[in-house]
Image (spheres, grey):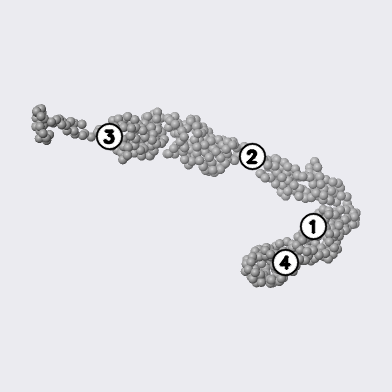
Amino acid sequence: LAVTAKWGTTDPETAAQNGKWQVGAMIYKEVVTQPAPVPVYSSSVINATTPAGLEITYNLTLANIVPSSSAFAVMVNSSSRAVSSVAVSGTKVLLTLASPVANGDAVTVAYTKPSTNPLQTASGGQADSFTARSVTNNVAAAVLPVYVSSVINEAEPARLEMTYNLSLANVVPASSSFAVSVNSSSRAVSSVAVSGTKVLLTLASPIAYGDAITVAYTKPSANPLQTTAGGQAVSFAAQPVVNNRSAPVNQPPSVTISSPTKGVAFIAPATVTIDATASDPDGTVSKVEFYNGTVKLGEKTSAPWSFTWKEVQAGTYSLTAAATDNSNSRKVSAEVNVVVEKAAPAVNQLPSVAISSHKDSDTIVAPATITLTAHATDSDGSIIKVEYFNGQEKIGESLAHPWSFSFECQEPVTFEITAKASDNHSATATSAPVKISVILKREYPDLINLYPNPNNGHFTVDMNAIAEYNEESTLAIVSLTGKTVYKDVVSPGEATRQIDITNSLSGNYILIITSRDGILTTRKFIKN
């Protein structure tokens, strides 16, 4: 402030200003305001002890008014480096950078005076903006971290662990900085983490036992691997990775004798062909050996796993098969006992058989489960099976006493059932036929027309009468043995349906249409 003293008798504007006091003069002050001094940028430096701190110095002490970090622009090697925070202390402005500066980095700083909280002195003098100024980089050359080794551990097969000789800063490079190869094929890196001396790469899929792995690193321009002192790891070409995955536990093979079956009898001198089924869940079957008790009969080293045992004399034998896989794991099948009998008399006595479960002309109301049973004997041997026929069509068989066979019947039909018994010398006998009639509880109206009939499996069904019901129904086609060969929904109002059962066996069939209230109608037809 500049102060000038003036005096006069009345008005300061007219008072004599001769520098002398006058009687009755009035004294007053004239105040002239001068602008506050402006702080001027002096220099900037990054010290060796704080490589992430940029220190700006001004010529005047600054007020503790802190501008936004966006007021400062820091460039490192021509790339922008974010400012994390700003502090003001005396003549210093202290910028904390997002990552430390390394030895040799070219650094500049610029300041754009903001409208809010600009840099200023306590008296209000505001620092001007300035363009990029060079920053003295006093960061000493840091010791560089050196790659040591890499490993895949059993507990974490999808993680590749790299080790360096120095502890690393928590600066994480992009996953594209690493190249992992597994059995000469690239394996993607999903994520990267840094912890102490370790760099942990998560792979897109796990490593298997025996895989050959390499890893390479290309130092990126942003966020390279580095120590807290700024020493940056150099790139390296593909290096081998130790694979500590354990060999998988070998699963044993499986083996069964498929032929002969238990209880099958042969006539001496017999030729017994032993067929086995063998497989291995995690490899291949290298051989199958065939045994009678503990005596090895022979072996095969490739499928089909079959061995023919010739000139087998009368006796009872316990057959097994032993499978060995490509890892030498071995599995023995369950025993199959076979009997080789002495040669039968010149004339084998035929077995005898009769149906015992039903009398001729029996009537059954459908739907029903029909169980057929036969009485079968052999005077000079044993019965090995009883087969059941409807006319000439075989409908089932039984391999054990009481020689029973069951089947379902849903529709009216007449069966002519015979039983055929086979003895242990392959002689057969057929029973007298027994007619069994299956009837429905009630007759159903004739509501459809089916043509042509007979047909080859392609035919048309007219359902005009059923369409008048205008409700959903079901159309099914069953054989006389009760097997359903076609089933589909009939939409409300549907009057015609084209049917294709050309893949079904030739024979007699029944077409049935049912609604939620039960059977609406049925129609028999013949498929040639």
Q: Earlier in the sequence, mark 3 or mark 4?
A: 3
Say which residue label 4 marks. Answer: 510
Q: Earlier in the sequence, mark 2 or mark 1?
A: 2
Alpha carbon distance from label 3 to label 1:
111 Å
Alpha carbon distance from label 3 to label 4:
108 Å
Amino acid on which disc 4 is placed: Ile
Residue at image location 70% in from the left, 69% down from the top: 455
In which quarter of the view is residue 387 placed?
A: bottom right
Q: Earlier in the sequence, mark 2 or mark 4?
A: 2
Residue at image location 37% in from the left, 29% down from the top: 47
Closest to the observer, 147 or 524: 524
Quadrant location, the C terminus: bottom right
Say which residue label 2 marks. Answer: 248
Amino acid on which disc 1 is placed: Phe
Alpha carbon distance from label 1 to label 4:
23 Å
Amino acid on which disc 3 is placed: Gly
Q: State left or right for residue 166 relative to residue 296.
A: left
Classed neighbour count for the residue bearing mark 1: other residues with Cα under 10 Å, few (<14), some (14–19), many (≥20)? some
Q: Earlier in the sequence, mark 1 or mark 4?
A: 1
Q: Earlier in the sequence, mark 3 or mark 1?
A: 3
| 3 and 2 marks in contact (CB < 8 Å) | no
